[in-house]
Image (cartoon, rainbow, N blue to C red):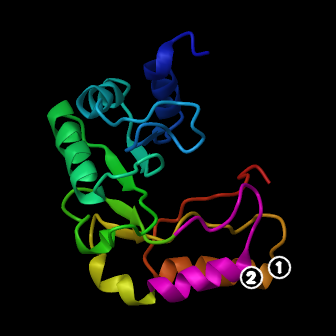
Amino acid sequence: RYPSGLQGVGDYIHKLGLKYALYTDAGTHTCSGAMPGTKGHEFEDMRMFAEWRCDYVKIDWCNSDGMDPTKAYTLLHEAQLSAGRQIVHSLCSWGVGKPWNWAAPIGHLWRTTGDICGPGRADYGNATKIAFFNQGLYKHAGLGYWNDPDMLIVGMTGLSEAQNRTVFSLWCMMASPLIAGNDVRT
């Protein structure tokens, strides 16, 4: 699919002045089940991400039955350090194991709840529930590490201008990552 490999894709993205992000899973397979996860291959996968000059990696929590999130994500952190490239680790256990209590030394951001919505379907009600859940977690965030209530749904179909502004304001007040979940071209 990529004649110059994923390193070439990363180089192209960097030339545009953007950061290069990849996705994996701490379990045996990704959430779709179509691709292998990193379990059992943590060191080789983190080494490859470093060689491809990845800047950010989301590490999901699907197909992780019987695994301990603290141990699994700690091992991935150790593997990343061993690879020798600073990579932002986005830990996505959907709040399993209360990552806000332990993730700061090993990750940069951690999901605090389940997904905010299905693909392309803004859910304002769920966004407000997530914001209320996260209001007490502010003390666990700091410089270089954040609670992650999931992507922004701002700009997705189905939200009014007032709802878009409200969601954006709430995410800013939570000092959460402002990761766009919409089609940025529109």
Q: Is residue 68 left or right of residue 147?
A: left
- Callout 2: SS: helix
Residue 117 screen position, x and y as percent: 68, 65
Kind of residue sitting beneath label 1:
Ser
Q: Residue at x 71, y 82 (%)?
A: 125
Quadrant the N terminus occupies: top right
Q: Residue at x 24, y 36 (%)?
A: 85
Q: Is residue 131 magenta?
A: yes
Q: Is residue 13 above or below residue 175?
A: above
Kind of residue sitting beneath label 2:
Gln
* 136 or 5, nearer to the observer: 136
Q: Residue at x 54, y 83 (%)?
A: 131
Residue 17 screen position, x and y as percent: 49, 39
- Point out the residue furthest to the top here: 3
* 1 or 17, nearer to the observer: 1
Instruction: Report the span colored magenta.
Output: 114-134
Q: Is residue 151 left or right of residue 65?
A: right
Quadrant the C terminus occupies: bottom right
Q: Is residue 15 magenta?
A: no
Residue on which disc 2 sits: 163
* 127 or 42, nearer to the observer: 42
Q: Is residue 150 left or right of residue 82?
A: right
Mark 1 and mark 2 residues within 8 Å of each other at the beta carbon: yes
Residue on which disc 1 sits: 160
| Within-10-Å neighbours for mark 1: few <14, some 14–19, many 20+ | few
Q: Residue at x 45, y 25 (%)?
A: 11
- Callout 1: SS: loop
